[in-house]
Image (cartoon, helix red, strand yellow):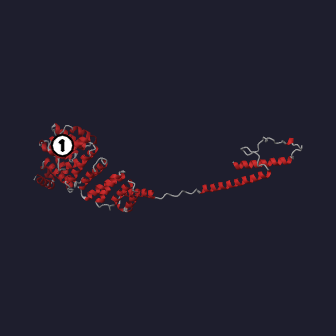
Amino acid sequence: MKRTACAILLVGALLTPAGAVSALQPFQMVRSLQLVQDRIASGDHAALPMQNKLLSMIDERMKETTALEFADDRNFEALLVYGMSGGNPRTIEAVLSRLHPESEQRRIGHAVLDFLHGAPVRARSALAVVDPLEMRHGLGAFVALVKGSVAGPDQASAALRHFDQARLLGQGTLVEEAAIRRAMPMAVAVEEPAKFLYLASSYVRSFLRSPYASEFAQSLVTGIITLFDTIDLNAVDDVIAAMTPEQQKVIYLRLARKGAIDGMPALSDHAASRLDTLSHHEDPRALLYAAMAALSSGDIDETARLIAGIDADRLSDSDRELLDAARVTVETVLARPEPLARPAPARQAEAEEASVRETAANEAVDDLERTVDEIGLEDEPRTAAGSSPVQQDPGDVPPEADPSGNLPDLEIVTSTRARLAEIDKLLQETTE
């Protein structure tokens, strides 16, 4: 009944001439805004333009408010909810400057402004002593959401507690939807896979049609990858199984792709197998990520088979680059080893020239040996250099001691020495 009345008020507000909007109290308009936000959370994407329109109308109404109107606490709370719903911070600042609210209201008001101005540390300090559970449910849910948002990753455990309060106080509303999405990365930060999966399951049951579901999907994929070593894959499959077949396909494709790129073959292989059971293996992306998983596991034959069935024209540019990389890898592994290279032409010519020189040297040595035989010097000892020794063998008779008294013919001696010198020179050159 209450929702029906709010809906009638909402339609009336949107159809009312601009001059008549001032007849509505700020809290009445903000309640209509919250109704629209609840419809958005339930998957009514058509309500998004209505939310923007209402925010604009509330902004104009807030600028006209007087201090007397804020004597009604509901209007002051409406101002804060408006601000935490994406309202204009300048309007809130202007209104607060005209008021003298109680200390806690002032603290919350300035904390909301700090939050909108991107000053989380100041907002965190201002809200430190504020207990959302002691406030009205509508305002308390928003305050708990802001406290969790400004806590940040460095206080992940505290942020989780605040988001739990926001979910409790804002069940079924856009506040709960946002609290779940923002709590999931905190559960990952404190390494609580069970909490992460509980939050994911809660979102799937209640808010899967939300226009912000794509952000949830990204958080889900990132969390599964980060917690992969400790998370229960069967529980992950149970969460994903509650989605539509098309949504399941998107999640598993993202997991398979991320696993393939980050070198996590177990994750990629698991996601690819789930895609296979969903009968979506004809999708070229599924084939590609399955191929990458097979490649990471060392199954080159399976990779080659999968790659052969991929239609590259149906892939995005980035996925085509992955396909090209996989093909190059497979071709490199499967390529036959090349035969030993023949010597380069220059080296071959050099080798042939060396062979000719060696043959010529061998022939020269043969000629030398024949020459030595001819002059009867074969048995004469030689030094390492090949020249004739100076000393005489024992028993040799010097020419001067020839019994006959005849001296050797000088011309014969000179000729023989010259021939020996030539032979020694030739032998030395051949050895070198």
Work out whether residue 315 or residue 194 is closer to the camera in this orientation and state it.
194
| Residue at (67% x, 53% y) in the render | 358
Horizontally, is 265 left or right of 66 in the view? right
Q: Is residue 65 visible?
A: no
Label 1, secondary structure: give it: helix
Q: Which residue appears farthest toward the right when viewing the image? A: 405
Work out whether residue 400 or residue 65 is closer to the camera in this orientation and state it.
400
Q: How many marks?
A: 1
Q: Can you identify the residue that label 1 sits on?
A: 95
> Please, is residue 212 above or below residue 153 in the view?
below
The image position of residue 136, as x and y in percent, is 14, 43
The image position of residue 112, as x and y in percent, is 21, 42
Q: Which residue appears farthest toward the front when viewing the image? A: 395
| Residue at (48% x, 59% y) in the render | 336
The image position of residue 104, as x and y in percent, is 17, 38
Q: Check disc 1 and give the amino acid type.
A: Val
| Residue at (28% x, 44% y) in the render | 191
Horizontally, is 340 left or right of 20 in the view? right
Work out whether residue 103 or residue 269 is closer to the camera in this orientation and state it.
269
The image position of residue 12, as x and y in percent, is 13, 55
